[in-house]
Amino acid sequence: MRRGEDNALRNVGRLFVALWRLVRGEDQRGRKVKWLVSQLRPYRGRVALMFVGLLAATAAGLAPPYLAGRAIDSGIQTGDVAALDLIVIAFVAVAIIYAAATYLQTYMVGWVGTRVLQDLRQRVFAHLQSMSIGFFTRRSPGVLISRMTNDIEALNQLVTDGVVTIFSSTLTLLGVVVILLVLDVQLALVVFLTFPLLLIASVIFRIVSHGAYRATRERIAAITAYLQESLSGVRVVRSFGQEPRHVDEMTELNEANRAVNMKTVYLNASYFPAVELLAAVATGVILVYGGGLAIDREIQIGVIVAFVGYLTTFFEPIQQLSQLYTTYQQGMAALDKIFDLLDTAPDMVDAPEAIDPGTLRGEIELDGVWFSYKEAAEPGEDVWALRDVDLHVPPGQTLALVGATGAGKSTFAKLVARFYDPQQGRVLVDGHDLRGVQQRALRRQLGIVPQEGFLFSGSVRENVAFGRPEASLEEIEAAIATVGATAFVEALPDGIETEVGERGIQLSAGQRQLVAFARALLAEPRILILDEATSNVDVRTEKTIEKGLERLLQGRTAIVIAHRLSTIRRAGKIVVLADGGIAEQGTHDELIAAGGPYSKLYGAWSESSVA
């Protein structure tokens, strides 16, 4: 017997060593779990209370089979009513402890879990805010939304629903093993013979299911991405009558999602009955082998009853852990995706010695700038959006960029805003290389009005004040008046407090653009970038905007990109871009007199206007 006890205790020790190795995180997944656990550190006091409740509930849950056995052996068989009464009182006390401890652990797990996931969601969102514009051009918005919603929700289910099951079931398993060894080592070792089969089945299930659950996360991300894109472009879909094609494509994505999920269903349907079968086999072994020992008076009947009770208690947490494995695998697949996102370092960061240049004068210079959207472009490749550009813009001057589509005009503006860094050369503002200037210091003095003015859900007032939330109502109304938007704002149902809807859907394109101009004006930028800012408005609205622009551009350096040449004739300098390089530059009159590319563009525009 002593040798059997030593072997059993040695096996228990090995189990604890295996658990310790998992906690230490000796593989990539273990490292991620360890990181997730580290997020509990700010709430360690409540985590400690959670474990107090968890241990108390587990201990109380392990007591009933033992008490049942004692009631049979010490009370019923011996006819000792006093002993039976004491055991019944112990039953009631254990039930009360179990109820109180379960409440404590459930509440604490829910509180800590929701706070940790709140922190994680905030961290992911803050990380996304730090990424460059190039990152968002390479990643689907729908996939990023899936990271913030589906993947974190999968983790939520794992943390809030699974943590109690994981720890409680593990402690219950260990507790049952120890109690069985204490009750009868020989009978316990016979029961343990079923464990290798259970271990083999579990290992096979884990290996096969890992890839399946990761595939489910990828499929649901693809569906989310396609749904986001389809809803955003619903007007285009409707105008071309392509609803059936979109339905067909969603059907294919949905079918692929169903297929990968059915694989997990098949795995669950195969694994869980196997656990049930092993539990039945183990119970049969106890009844046959233990019953023979009881008939020979080598063991008490209460011990057999306790063994059967504990065997049910042993296989029940195994089933719970098996059922939880679906949640675990989905949560870990989600954690992998979130880790991939968090491990993606921002490619546009402030240098350690980056400076705050203070109030900018607005001098801009491009010195030998080469830029390609392909990150590792070679000098001989035909992928350059800008090629060896040298240009100087004095403070307060309006620079107009002209050229065919794809000539590099928007790229020029993006480099000045430092949405990208050039592969070769420098972009300087007030003599400072932008790589050495704090991005926040640059952007707070930069105003950008794109081709389509993007508005956020909220009121007109909130959208105009987006760049300066502290601005007074008088300042906001003054900005609206300056760009000539007062009439349309006052005509809205609630005036300046009218809700514009998602992406400003309640307003027309021209109205959205006027709000965007007022927003740029209120921010009081030193450098203003207008990227095709009037291309989506009618001629009357354009003339209204042009009147506001005269005041808006006064005293500021401006980069104006436009196909409508009427908006750039009064620019201090006009630069014609072609194939990423400067074809010619000068004032309107100088370029007309030169008879070059600008003169031809202006002639074509004049003819189209007359027509």
Image: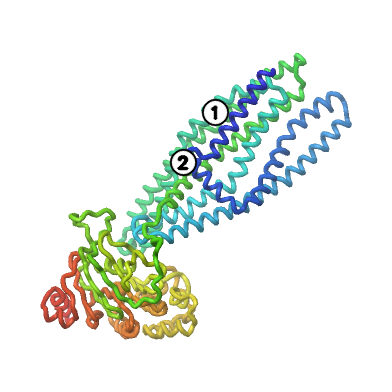
Vertical order, 111 against 484 (above or below): above
Q: Which mark is residue 308?
A: none
**Amino acid type of the residue that numbered disc 2 sits on in the rendered structure:** Gln
| Residue 469 located left or right of residue 306 | left
Asked where in the image residue 527 lies, by quadrant, the reply is bottom left
Vertical order, 438 against 526 (above or below): above
Tell me where residue 523 appears, x and y as whole percent. 41, 77
Q: Residue at x 43, y 58 (%)?
A: 128
Q: Residue at x 69, y 19 (%)?
A: 2
Check disc 2 and report the residue beneath it: 28
- Residue nearer the viewer, 213 or 18: 18
Tell me where residue 393 appears, x and y as whole percent. 26, 76
Vertical order, 183 against 470 (above or below): above
Vertical order, 602 against 4 (above or below): below
Q: Which mark is residue 199?
A: 1
Tell me where residue 199 appears, x and y as whole percent. 54, 28
Image quadrant in which the C terminus is located: bottom left
Which of pointers 2 and 1 lies earlier in the amino acid sequence?
2
**Amino acid type of the residue that numbered disc 1 sits on in the rendered structure:** Leu
Q: Residue 424: in sight, yes or no?
A: yes
